[in-house]
Amino acid sequence: MFKDKEIENLIQKELSRQTEGIELIASENYASETVMKASGSILTNKYAEGLPNKRYYGGCKVVDEIEELAIERLKELFGAYWANVQPHSGSQANAAVFLACLNPGDSILGFDLSHGGHLTHGSPVNFSG
């Protein structure tokens, strides 16, 4: 599979860790085999910022077609008029809510990092500047 046997062994070690235990970290969701294949496909080489047919880079026609197909399928699945299939950062979503709803010094309820909490749930090192 790999020319670098050391990396191959380490990847196998991580695969064993993931398949032999129950992961309770929300951000470490198990991807299906289909998702893993797509993630390891030629699409990994393509950067497609923006919306279909309104990208900031050229050469996105096929990516646009894939995204439009995913949007249509999601709309049909949920009976929706609109859908966005672009992944976004949960960390940025948390920051947006905190900055919109809280004032400096406000309290929030969240687990400490050492007890399963997330960096974005109030840890002072999460924000800089």
Image: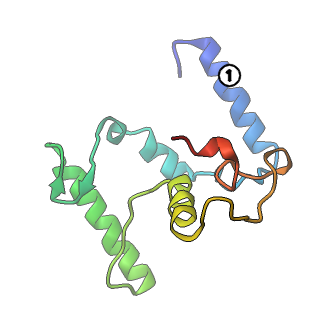
Give the side of residue 127 with respect to residue 66, left or right.
right
Give the side of residue 82 with respect to residue 92, left or right.
left
Q: Please say if 83 is above or below 86.
A: below
For this rendering, which residue is in front, 4 or 64? Answer: 64
Q: Disc 1 residue type?
A: Leu
Q: Position of residue 90 (x, y in %)?
A: 55, 57
Q: Secondary structure at mark 1?
A: helix
Give the side of residue 94 with respect to residue 44, left or right.
right
Q: Give me the residue at 75% from left, 43% from top.
A: 19
Q: Give me the residue at 68% from left, 47% from top.
A: 119
Count of marks placed on residues: 1
Few, some or many C-alpha atoms within 10 Å of disc 1 (few <14, some 14-19, many ≥20)? few
Quarter residue 101 falls in: bottom right
Q: Position of residue 4 (x, y in %)?
A: 55, 12
Colour mode of the rendering: rainbow
Q: Give me the residue at 56% from left, 53% from top.
A: 91
Q: Position of residue 97 (x, y in %)?
A: 54, 66
Q: Give me the residue at 16% from left, 51% from top.
A: 61
- Which residue in the protein does label 1 denote? 10
Residue at far right of view: 115
Q: Position of residue 38 (x, y in %)?
A: 42, 46
Q: Please say if 45 is above or below 106.
A: above
For this rendering, which residue is in front, 95 or 1? Answer: 95
